[in-house]
Image (tube, rainbow, N blue to C red):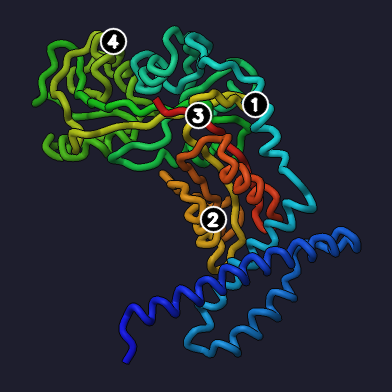
Amino acid sequence: MRNIEETRRELDAIDDQIAELYNRRLDLARDVADAKRADGSPISNPAREREILARIAKKVGPDREDGAALLFTTLFGLSKALQRELLIGESDVTMAMDKAAADTGSIFPSGETVACQGTEGAYSQIAASRIFKFPVILFFNGFEDVFNAVEKGMCRYGVLPIENSTAGSVTSVYDQMARHNFSIVRATRIPVSHVLLARKGASLKSIREVTSHPQALQQCSACLQSLKDVRQTPAINTAVAARMVAESGRDDFAAIASRECAEVYGLDILAEDISNTPANFTRFICISKNLEIYPDSRKISIMMSLPHRPGSLGAILAKFSAIGVNLTKLESRPVPGRDFEFRFNFEFEATPGNPKVRRLISELALDPEIEHFTFLGAYAEI
């Protein structure tokens, strides 16, 4: 029986052969690209791929055919990516990134007109005041209104909540992201310290109705359950809820909102720090109509729809892993009108000038099997 060192030496020799064959295969892919350039044939050839997979499956046997299929499907993807690079060149997306990086100033602006959902005291307003030193804030009723204001040029920037550490993603914002043209230029996360607010003179025992944004109600569910016979009423925004209470004339009506709202609307704080978990953060993105890439950008977001077949998402994830990129978020949302098909939002840590990252983005943008690829932005998170 051979010892482990002997086995490892044989494995190393095999790995060296695989590396040589890998290089040889990609060299031949270049020759294939030259032939396709000459005769105008398409890069992708599904019939040829099926033929190879069937042949390999017979060679390795039923116990190993699935692993072999994964290996060779990955090789096909690498080969096609190389051919696209040789035949098509750089994608429009990476050229737009270069132009944006060249045209964007070196310093993020300190003061601009910013669209936010809600009213004074809203967490979106607090986030906007953190991103910009001197913002001029326009308030709108809904998230779609913020997207529209930026898209139509009413203001240069908009600030939107995208996820909460307790309640999860703000799905309505993700759904709007597929319907509008915009670029993410900044992100920030702020601590969310919910308090229970009521008109002056009201007491905790007198409260019979509590209003707030649905996510805030969810984030404070334990506190609400401790209040007996209290009805929960959703509002479009925590600050709007505080304003409703202030204008209601009622002493049995309370709102879950920020501490800032107590001062803005002249309300009393009946209970403090009522979130289910003490470490409660909401993450916000700042969007613009045009692509802006500042030198301090360290995160990138993209969106795409993938083919509805086994392994399509896994193949994409493998590409990120291969170049050592850390995915920080992967969000899936159903594609309206298409049963069981999903749109994926990827967020990852990377600089837009990284050659490997640029090559990956270009590869994804040029891949005809990926539907509706969108580069959402490269940005810093403060």
Q: Is residue 11 left or right of residue 149?
A: left
From the top left corner, tell me how far across and down residue 332 is, in percent.
48, 51
Gap between marks 1 and 4 measured at Cα = 42 Å
Q: Residue furthest toward the bottom?
A: 1
Amino acid type for the residue under numbered disc 2: Lys
Q: CA distance from mark 4 to mark 2?
A: 51 Å
- Which label is found at residue 319? 2
Say few, some or many: other residues with alpha carbon within 10 Å of mark 2 (under 14 / 14 to 19 / 20 or more): some
Q: Secondary structure at mark 2?
A: helix
Tell me where residue 21 appears, x and y as whole percent. 62, 71
Going from the N terminus, do you reach mark 4 or mark 2 first?
4
Is residue 108 in view from this perspective? yes
Numbered badge on residue 265: 4
Label 3 residue SS: loop
Q: Position of residue 301 (x, y in %)?
A: 52, 39
Q: Judging from the image, what secondary structure is the residue with disc 1 in?
A: helix
1 or 4: tag closer to the N-terminus: 1
Q: Name the residue carrying label 1.
A: 100
- The image quarter in which residue 149 lies: top right
Query: Which of the two residues, 280 or 334, is positioned nearer the viewer here?
Result: 280
Left or right: 89, with 58 as reference point: right
Of the pair 160 and 59, the residue shown nearer to us? 59
Q: Amino acid at mark 3?
A: Ser
* Up/down of 260 relative to 38, above or below: above
The crowd level at tag 1 (other Cα within 10 Å; few <14, some 14-19, many 20+) is some
Question: On the rendered image, what quadrant is the C terminus found in?
Answer: top left
Q: Find numbered disc 4 in the image and state the secondary structure of the residue it sits on.
A: helix
Residue 297's disc number: 3
Quote the CA–CA distance across marks 1 and 2.
Answer: 25 Å
